[in-house]
Image (cartoon, rainbow, N blue to C red):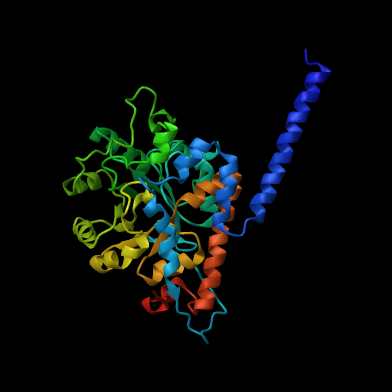
Amino acid sequence: MTTRASRRKSSGRALEIARRTLALERAVNDVVSVADFQELAMAAVDAVAFDYIDGGSWDELSLAENEAAWLRYRLRPRVLVDVSRIDPSTTLLGARAAFPVAIAPMAFHGLASLAAEPASARAAASAGVPFTLSTMSSRSIEEVAEAAPDGVRWFQLYTQADPGRSRALVERAEAAGYSAIVLTVDLPVLGYRERDRQNEFDVAAVPLGNFTGDEPGPSHKDPGPSLTWDDLATIRSWSSLPLVLKGILTAEDARLAVEDGADAIVVSNHGARQLDRVPAPIDVLEEVVGAVDGRAEVWVDGGVRRGLDIAIALALGARGVLIGRPILWALAAGGQAGVERALAILREEFEITLALLGTPTPAAIRREHVTR
């Protein structure tokens, strides 16, 4: 039988939850830069989980460099250009994007929020940009597809030790309406991540959405050193979807990628979570663009924090950018609404940049619009 005291206690808990929710909503609405979400996320999630989300490898030199590198570039605006109509939209793999941004694949959205990948995917669909689901997602391929049926969704593949399991993931993604396979190529083994080691964080203990409890547990080590260029033809044969290679930092590998039929390349150092002391992706973007020579789309990620960064990437030859950590920060801070706010900030910043740069569309941005 429910007592008056227990009812008061329950009512008090509900009131406290409502107050916290209102305070969080106000905090999210007050954010004016995506970087501001980092502090909110730190307060919202477990410290060990935050270290996993936010950390890099070894001394985290490349982690710091990923952000710092963007700040060394300078924009060269042109004046007396008609910018009365700004159109920030573009296409990525032939699909319209509201502006040149996609959400990067990131494991374990559930560490940031119980709303997990469905919330991020819905926010991406609402903003009109692609969402990339990680193999190591908290929710399944199918559940995320159901959550955002009208959004552009790509599936990131970590190949598994058993090729049959890899193929099954690709086939599930195609059947669920994902429109590209993003193959991560820079993770033969896990980078030396000191924060996770100090915290004794075990990725194998984190629940996964794409694997049942009856299967052998996958891990980030599953791709293994055996994945080679010779495997790309086999992976491509598993579906009719475009194949994107993520994790390329050199002209040599970019040439091999397009020779092997990659439809797009992501210039990426895996968020500085793999090999430390590698260049920031933005610093090698032009090298890769030159090697690709228009034969595939080139995207870049790593340290993107401003709409200004998007314009710099386009000036250096990228088709678009992928946004990583700020999305998880925003998800942790405010769920779907937080991610929507982060994307809205980036779009507004980019639109203002287009106007002030004298480039009313992304296609109008040229190499001469940026210098170092």
Residue 69 x %, y %: 40, 63
Q: Looking at this rendering, what residue extends furthest in the top direction?
A: 1
Q: Looking at this rendering, what residue extends furthest in the left direction?
A: 230
Name the residue: 83% across, 19% down.
4
Name above or below for residue 274 compared with residue 261: above
Residue 298 x %, y %: 33, 62
State the quadrant of the C terminus. bottom left
Q: With 250 as the anchor, is 176 left or right in this view? A: right
Q: Looking at this rendering, what residue extends furthest in the right direction?
A: 4
- Front one among 255 and 30: 30
Is residue 93 visible in the rendered image? The answer is no
Name the residue: 58% across, 59% down.
33
Residue 58 x %, y %: 35, 45
Name the residue: 53% across, 77% down.
356
Quadrant of residue 252 within the rendered picture: bottom left
Quadrant of residue 213 within the rendered picture: top left
Residue 5 x %, y %: 81, 19
- Front one among 199 and 107: 199
Q: Looking at this rendering, what residue extends furthest in the bottom direction?
A: 80
State the quadrant of the N terminus. top right
Q: With 11 as the anchor, is 71 left or right in this view? A: left
Name above or below for residue 224 compared with residue 303: above
- Front one among 160 and 281: 281
Name the residue: 31% across, 58% down.
264
Q: With 287 as the anchor, is 315 left or right in this view? A: right
Q: With 15 as the anchor, is 129 left or right in this view? A: left
Quadrant of residue 292 within the rendered picture: bottom left
- Front one among 1 and 109: 109
Is residue 186 visible in the rendered image? The answer is yes
Instruction: Report the number of discs.
Output: 0
